[in-house]
Amino acid sequence: MKYVIAVDCEGPACVVGAPGGTLNDAPAQYEFARRQATAEASAAARGLFAAGATQVVVWDTHGGGVNLVYDELDERCDIFNGVHGPRLAMLDATYAGLLFVGYHARDNTVAAPLAHTFSSATYQWIKLNGREVGEIAIDAAVAGAHGVPVLFMASDDKAVAEANEFFPGITTVTTKVGYSWNAALSKHPRRVLAEIEAAAQAAARNPGGVKPFAFTAPLELEIRHKRIDTADEACLPRHGWQRVDAYTVKRTLRSVTDWF
């Protein structure tokens, strides 16, 4: 009964970033986002503990991994933060499930607030085995490599639809409906907390409907850059990528975990 809650900052209620820009371009929005993401993570944790969780690890995934207001998290949680290590480094086969709170839709998604994959400034899209993917599917596949399923998603309607596409049967809460990159119709940020707590509790009590997610190996990874110079950098000999065209690079992986 151990769980990881992976928390990003674009998907919580009322978060839309700066007009024409990102979340990090809007200081007041970022401050709200980090507090709302903290509150939504705490709500999910309360649901898990109510369902009998023995450990809940909250993983701070946004940017440099130091965003949440840690002393406002449910104090029963443990916290994984920082960068420059394997993704989901804390996870192993002893965990019962991974939950996504505040994740966002992948690149190339219409009317999805702040949609991107790892870097909105760098990548146009990322494909694995010819299928466009975002951070949702990638992190789910890393968890799946350990035999751990994704049980829950709380985010905007486009990210929720993406989760349902990859993981049929997942429990979800829609925090807002996206209208554009920087616009959404959101639930009240306090009201959504009760929904998240109840849904996370239900997901933990009924985990059998979702299986660990995996891509068929070997994996063909293809990335389309927004700038030619970053594609140039990717294809330096030490990085192991091949050029498809001026903007697109590819490589073959044995497992999704080899990427990181």
Image (tube, grey):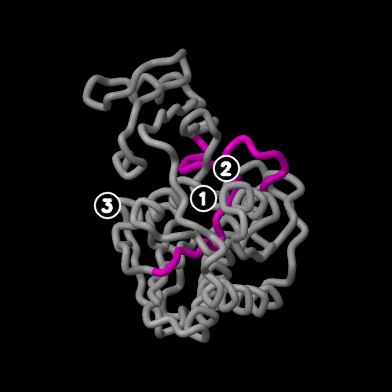
Query: In the rendered image, which residue does mark 3 sit on?
Result: 85
Q: Earlier in the sequence, mark 2 or mark 1?
A: 2
Tell me, for residue 136, which label it has, or none.
1
Q: Is residue 44 magenta?
A: no
Verify whether residue 98 appears in magenta.
Answer: yes
Q: Is residue 225 above or below residue 173?
A: above
- Mark 2 vs 3, N-terminal side: 3
State the residue at coordinates (68%, 49%).
158
Q: Distance between the Cα atoms at labels 2 and 1?
A: 8 Å
Residue 146 place in picture, x, y as percent = 34, 56
The CA span between labels 3 and 1 is: 18 Å
For the residues labelled 2 and 3, the Cα–Cα distance comes to 22 Å
The residue most toward the front is 208
State whether residue 100 appears in this view: yes
Q: Main secondary structure of the magenta part?
A: loop
- Magenta residues span 96-121
Across and down, in percent, residue 9 comes to 53, 59
Do residues under tags 2 and 1 come within 8 Å of each other at their CB atoms?
A: yes
**Amino acid marked by disc 1:** Ile
The correct choice, above or below, for 158 with respect to 188 in the image is above
Q: Is residue 162 left or right of residue 120?
A: right
